[in-house]
Amino acid sequence: MAPRASLRDRWLGWRNRVVASPRFQRWAAGFPLTRGIARKNTRALFDLCAGFVYTQVLTACIRLDLFRILAEGPLTLDMLARRLDLPVEKTRCLMRAAASLDLVRALPGDRFGLADLGAALTGNPGIAAMVEHHALLYADLADPVALLRGTAEPTRLARYWPYAAGETADAASVAPYGGLMGSSQALIADDVLDACDLSRSRHLMDVGGGEGAFLQAVAARHDALPLTLFDLPAVAGRAAERLAQAGLAERITCRGGSFHDGLPAGADTMSLVRIVHDHDDGPALALLKAVHAALPPGGTLILAEPMAGTPGAEPVGDAYFGFYLLAMGSGRPRRAEELHAMLRRAGFATTREHRTRRPLLTRLIVAQKDAR
């Protein structure tokens, strides 16, 4: 026998039936007190349906290098058509679409210039790299139900991130994602460093450090702090080459290995920047335990990543990262309280969240090992 529905559940059922009624929808759209809400909800529903098209407008702008071109100053439609190598009317279609998304701004004289969002993109190349990368994600999400049921074919993202499927990564397989990791880490590195204090650290090791974008930002702020990058051997090798080209070979030591075999000791501070959410619960906990074991008494872990349930950014953590990691085949977005609990299970004595400037992109938890 089914349990009796609560008063709240019955009220929600009645409300949903009312809102679903086309007759009510037409009335709400015309009644002065509900008209604004009805129009807002209509727009929100349409945006959900049209979101892919909006993204493809952005993709076209990036592939045509539109934002860099307009960074030089506003241009007429005819001039843009020549620079973009598009027919004038197709250029007008693109520019009107981009203007409707606040990427560009329509100006008098049939001219167009950058709007705030377009200008912001010119200073964040990592976003453009992610937009291009999303072509793989969209292909994997062509049948989201099959993905949820586990009946989909092997995904492109799983091949892109070989470690997600437990495959051995070699130089050829890590090359495609090395630059993408660097771009995404560079986007948040300063936010992480603004939120944590490294002044008392004697040695920082970045675990899963990719090609060194985060440690490069650390080196710029802390010129006397010894730094070590730890990642898979093929990744660490690429990092060593990149950091040498940046003149940081003597500042940053690159070490290759797997956390499954334990982490090297010697650092009193370790960082995990956008790493934990890439792993399922078992491997994620094993990683945190490996960090705890490698740290000396009183050592510190800096854990930074986007988190599920972030106020004002729920779709980012729960929808975007939820389905991205589902397609990747490994990991899941976690709420802050879940990470605090995992850190305590791993052996850390205290955990505390520090505010970041843009929690939508990353939040920060600092965990401390017992000093005894």
Image (cartoon, helix red, strand yellow):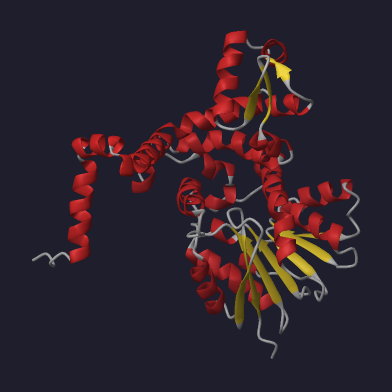
Tell me if residue 55 can be seen.
Answer: yes
Of residues 198 and 95, the one nearer the viewer is 95
Quarter of the rendering occupied by the C terminus? bottom right
Quarter of the rendering occupied by the N terminus? bottom left
Relative to 293, say whether 109 is above or below: above
Relative to 192, say whether 100 is above or below: above
Residue in the picture at 47% in, 32% down: 52
Counting from the top left corner in percent of width and height, residue 147 is at: 39, 44
The answer to whether residue 166 is left or right of residue 16 is right
Counting from the top left corner in percent of width and height, residue 242 is at: 82, 47
Relative to 114, say whether 309 is above or below: below
Question: Residue 4 sits in which quadrant?
Answer: bottom left
Residue in the picture at 72% in, 68% down: 196
The answer to whether residue 125 is left or right of residue 97 is right
Question: Residue 286 sits in which quadrant?
Answer: bottom right
Total residue callouts: 0
The answer to whether residue 39 is left or right of residue 257 is left
